[in-house]
Amino acid sequence: YITCKMQNCSEAARSKPFPGSIDHNSLIVQGDYVFVQLTSGGRPHYYVSYRRSPFAQMKLPKYSLPKDMHVISTDENQVFAAVQEWNQNDTYNLYISDTRGVYFTLALENVKSSQGLEGNVMIDLYEVAGIKGMFLANKKIDNQVKTFITYNKGRDWSLLQAPHTDLRGNPIQCLLPYCSLHLHLKVSDNPYTSGNIASRDTAPSIIVASGNIGTELSDNDISMFVTSDAGNTWRQIFEEEHSVLYLDQGGVLVAMKHTSLPIRHLWLSFDEGRSWSKYSFTSLPLFVDGVLGEPGEETLIMTVFGHFSHRSEWQLVKVDYKSIFDRRCAEEDYRPWQLHSQGEACIMGAKRIYRKRKSEKKCMQGKYAGAMTSEPCVCTEADFDCDYGYERHSNGQCLPAFWYNPSSLSKDCSLGQSYLNSTGYRKVVSNNCTDGVRERYTAKPQQCPGKPPQGLRILTADGRLTAEQGHNVTFLVQLDEGDLQRSLIQVDFGDGIAVSYANLSSTEDGIKHIYQNVGIFRVTVLVENSLGSDSAVLYLHVTCPLEHVHLSLPFVTTKNKEINATAVLWPSQVGTLTYVWWFGNNTEVCI
């Protein structure tokens, strides 16, 4: 991993944050974050840079022994990561970070995973469009996969309440937590086919998905379900899988059956999936290969493409629904709808009221206006998650975990600086609550205690212990505890030259030195402050490549007479050499 300024990226101007190489294909650049992986001692280590600041190692709970990690999302200045522990095979744990992406806390354990067609890992986690902080996930519990929902970015999860009646109006006996609704959460990579679940930013309360009712998620008896109140209640809409398309901001839902047989009908709903009408879109039955909506929020046009027989060419059928509406919606055609979670109106620290078209009105909505009003809520304990190193106990309090020492944060900073002294809680990122318990639960800045330098290391930027004469060697000075910026740094290169630095700014890109002679040099570094000192040693072998060898000896001599044979080297000082002499009488002499 190499960094440099765009104006000058020459060899001398480059810097390397890591000695040696990073793992192959591990570099991820996503928004404000850069991620890399380094493996040492058979274990992967993960590093993150926020807004191109220096890399920091990502901190998972100390009991975590990850063997794989996938970055799920970096939206809203926070990292959602899926981590597979050493004892997991078909599940991952979900972790969520602080703003810098360094400190991670557990959001949900044992989330189902599967292999994609190209060998990629797919995590059963779905971020609902249009509602900040809302996710659906399939969790494995005692070999059963169940669907859970969260409205606050993973702080709290709950099962989905099944519909009270089936498609024919018959009552469904399904009691939480023994029975619930379970959904398939795979999103299609193909833009022409829908996945198992769909939601839109312009229709924030509507989710359409395939799934089943029972004790666990199943691939049998799959039906289609819809919610028009953001997951609080669900309705069964079809007994077989369908592709569902959103038109006119969800004002029109178009459903087309998943089947290998040719079809000529589709279904339309103008009331968020409560009722459906059957329409014919072609005179001849069509083998449907895909459906595509026209781009734009106000679209009422969709294109169906397929073929009339397995030997025929592709057919494109354009369906325009504008003629169904005779007018645009007016203000009196709408009603207010408040986003909530089972009656709780404060979602992510705010009360949000949206505008919905009345179900009996049949008019075209037009451009999406977003939430009508958004009012911040007073902060409560529910707006805060446990901070890194803390776990929630049965009484709801966040207390230090068995592996965490709360005073460890003060050891990671230096005299004259400050650190955030955690209260055990951290506000859910993007939560908009104000006042209330915010002051009591927010971490307080505190001055760092001073400490002597410890854990000093000196190494070369390329990680090697050899160098060539006359070439720049870059040394890196690293310290586990203490502050290089407020310490005196003395480096002796072992060739009679030594340098001193009074602050780190001169050594951030490494300390450069050129050796004029060959040999093995003892490089020492001493770091000291008013509280103590520490030293480290590195042995560097400086060599010079041999360019020419000239052999000098008489052209004629007398038998049994001793002669002098001389090997002349260029350059003359090349370090340790082995001479092998080979004479015509097969006598070999090694020196």
Image: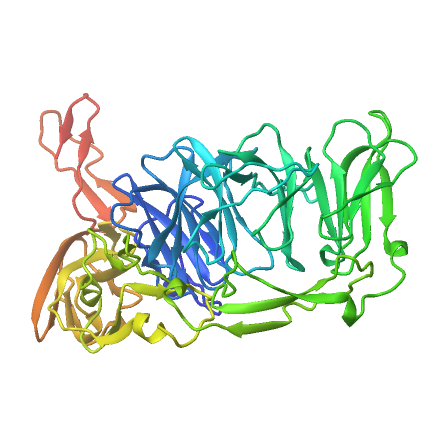
Work out whether 125 lies above or below 526.
Answer: above
Left/right of residue 485 with respect to residue 176 in the rendered view: left
Q: For this rendering, which residue is in front, 1 or 452?
A: 452
The colour mode here is rainbow
What is the total number of numbered labels drawn onto the structure image? 0
Left/right of residue 285 with respect to residue 296 in the rendered view: right
Q: For this rendering, which residue is in front, 141 or 331?
A: 331
- Residue drawn at the location 78% of the way across and 44% of the way down: 276
Residue placed furthest toward the right = 283
Work out whether 504 lies above or below 524.
Answer: below
Residue 502: x percent and y percent?
19, 76
Q: For this rendering, which residue is in front, 213 or 451?
A: 213
Residue 64: x percent and y percent?
29, 45
Quadrant assignment, res 503: bottom left
- Residue drawn at the location 9% of the way across and 64% of the way down: 534
Quadrant assignment, res 256: top right
Left/right of residue 432 with respect to residue 322 in the rendered view: left
User: In this view of the protein, can residue 346 be seen by the observer?
Assistant: yes
Q: Point out the image quarter for the N terminus.
A: bottom left
Residue 406: x percent and y percent?
20, 62
Q: Point out the image quarter for the C terminus.
A: top left
- Residue drawn at the location 18% of the way across and 65% of the way down: 411
User: In this view of the protein, can residue 17 be seen by the observer?
Assistant: no
Work out whether 244 lies above or below 221.
Answer: below
Q: For this rendering, which residue is in front, 10 or 169?
A: 169
Residue 220: x percent and y percent?
59, 27
